[in-house]
């Protein structure tokens, strides 16, 4: 019994020390796996949607390991251009490529004896995956532009919000690397699957932001909590944190009620469903209710996904004309297109006749940036592309952000 009590105490202490909030079965299962894996040198793969706390768990694995006194190096593979990722990870010699004016030590050498956290591992190019596999198996690598072999002792923790098994089948990710990274997998749950943890999360974030602003956290009503539990939370814990930060800041730490909470709940995005469609079916499925900016965003995205079927897209856009009055109202104060610019369905179709696909793509990127308040990572998630691809599109279309 004494050992069981000690184990429970240690279990809760780990969650408290490393900022892991929640008592649901989903969270406790993830923490249990974390505590089993941390003392070992096994590679860990952390999976889960964006905003579920993958870096928090990666840091906890490192801090609970025998490598905790050595460096913890975090690398976002999706935010580094493909042409630079290999150099960033493994270093380069002077003159290895244009702009390499001096020798550079890579992240793996920096993390020697410690831990390297490779976030968004699914965005790593195949060529770089080969060198990563070599490091995992032998600890050996060569800097870009050199044949000299270097050796490091680094534990690898990887994370992804992608389906790597699907990527393996599609030959986008090496099967042998997947198995090597997936020695232990920690699956983090979506917030919508453990809403019972929302009260604890709200309390944690509320107290934290109030202290930062020298305010007193006044709490939240049960009705307001019920509203929060009913939301879909597509951005998971990160989205909840951002909302609580906003409410506490703008309401000056006031007691959170349904009345002041509703002011900060953004319009819900329509559900996205994909299915195999027959040739006689419409290629674009759009919701018939609440047509507005979110639906326009879906239209633009569909246009890019089915570039060869632009005429079918026009027919889908024409279907939206039944709700044109509501669409006009929703755009009255929009930065994308004003209500005065939206006249009739025919004019919209004529506009697409003269609008090439590059212009559509540029408009969609700008719309995503506006919807994410300039946050590039969130914009990339909305578009379903990596940050690296988004940066390339900025340069291609001359978008200044």
Image (spheres, rainbow, N blue to C red):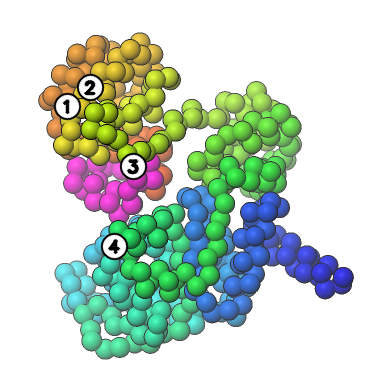
Name the residue tied to disc 1.
311
Contact? badges 1 and 3 (CB < 8 Å): no
Left or right: 226 as drawn, with respect to 294: right
Q: Residues within 10 Å of mark 3 (few under 14, many from 20)?
A: some
Q: Nearer the viewer, mark 3 or mark 2?
A: 2
* Discs 3/4, front: 4
Q: Dot 2 surroundings within 10 Å: few (below 14), some, or many (20 or more)? A: some
Q: Residue at x 55, y 30 (%)?
A: 265
Give whichever of 255, 30 is nearer the camera: 30
Spatial CA distance of label 4 from label 2 is 35 Å
Secondary element type, mark 2: helix
Q: Under tag 3, what secondary structure?
A: helix
Side (left or right) of 331 relative to 20: left
Q: Secondary structure at mark 4?
A: loop
Alpha-carbon span between mark 2 and mark 1: 7 Å
Q: Which residue is mark 3?
A: 383
The numbered mark at residue 171 is: 4
Query: Which label's residue is closer to the chain start, 1 or 3?
Result: 1
Given contact means CB atoms under 8 Å apart, are the residues at marks 1 and 4 in contact?
no
* Residue 106 appears in the picture as rendered: no
Residue at 55% x, 48% y is: 190
Image quarter (top left, top right, bottom left or bottom right) of the N terminus: bottom right
Q: Which mark is residue 315?
A: 2
Q: Residue at x 25, y 18 (%)?
A: 318
Q: Earlier in the sequence, mark 3 or mark 4?
A: 4
Magenta span: 379-401
Q: Are marks 2 and 1 in contact (CB under 8 Å)?
A: yes
């Amino acid at each position: 019994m004494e050992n069981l009590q000690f184990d429970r105490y240690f279990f809760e202490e780990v969650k408290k020390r490393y900022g892991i909030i929640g008592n649901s079965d989903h969270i406790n299962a993830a923490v249990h796996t974390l505590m089993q894996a941390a003392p070992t040198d096994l590679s860990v793969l952390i999976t889960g949607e964006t905003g579920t706390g993958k870096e928090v768990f990666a840091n906890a694995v490192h801090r609970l390991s025998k490598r905790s006194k050595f460096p913890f190096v975090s690398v976002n593979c999706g935010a580094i251009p493909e042409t630079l990722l290999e150099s960033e990870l493994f270093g380069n010699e002077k003159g290895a490529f244009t702009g390499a004016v001096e020798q550079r030590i890579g992240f793996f050498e920096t993390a020697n004896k410690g831990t390297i956290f490779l976030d968004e591992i699914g965005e790593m190019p195949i060529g770089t995956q080969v060198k990563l596999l070599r490091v995992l198996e032998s600890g050996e690598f060569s800097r870009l532009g050199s044949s000299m072999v270097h050796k490091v002792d680094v534990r690898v923790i990887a994370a992804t919000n992608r389906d790597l098994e699907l990527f393996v089948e599609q030959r986008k990710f090496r099967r042998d690397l997947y198995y090597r990274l997936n020695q232990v997998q920690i699956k983090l749950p979506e917030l919508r699957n453990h809403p019972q943890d929302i009260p604890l999360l709200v309390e944690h974030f509320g107290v934290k932001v109030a202290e930062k602003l020298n305010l007193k956290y006044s709490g939240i009503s049960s009705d307001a909590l019920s509203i929060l539990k009913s939301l879909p939370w597509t951005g998971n814990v990160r989205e909840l944190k951002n909302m609580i930060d906003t409410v506490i800041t703008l309401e000056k730490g006031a007691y959170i009620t349904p009345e002041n909470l509703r002011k900060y709940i953004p319009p819900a995005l329509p559900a996205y469903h994909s299915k195999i469609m027959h040739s006689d079916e419409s290629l674009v499925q759009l919701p018939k209710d609440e047509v507005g900016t979110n639906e326009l965003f879906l239209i633009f995205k569909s246009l890019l996904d089915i570039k060869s079927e632009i005429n079918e897209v026009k027919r889908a856009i024409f279907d939206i004309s039944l709700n044109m009055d509501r669409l006009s109202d929703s755009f009255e104060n929009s930065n994308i297109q004003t209500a005065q610019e939206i006249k009739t369905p025919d004019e919209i179709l004529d506009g697409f006749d003269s609008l090439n696909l590059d212009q559509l793509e540029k408009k969609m990127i700008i719309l995503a940036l506006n919807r994410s308040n300039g946050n590039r990572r969130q914009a990339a998630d909305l578009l379903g592309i990596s940050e690296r691809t988004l940066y390339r599109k900025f340069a291609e279309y001359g978008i200044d952000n």
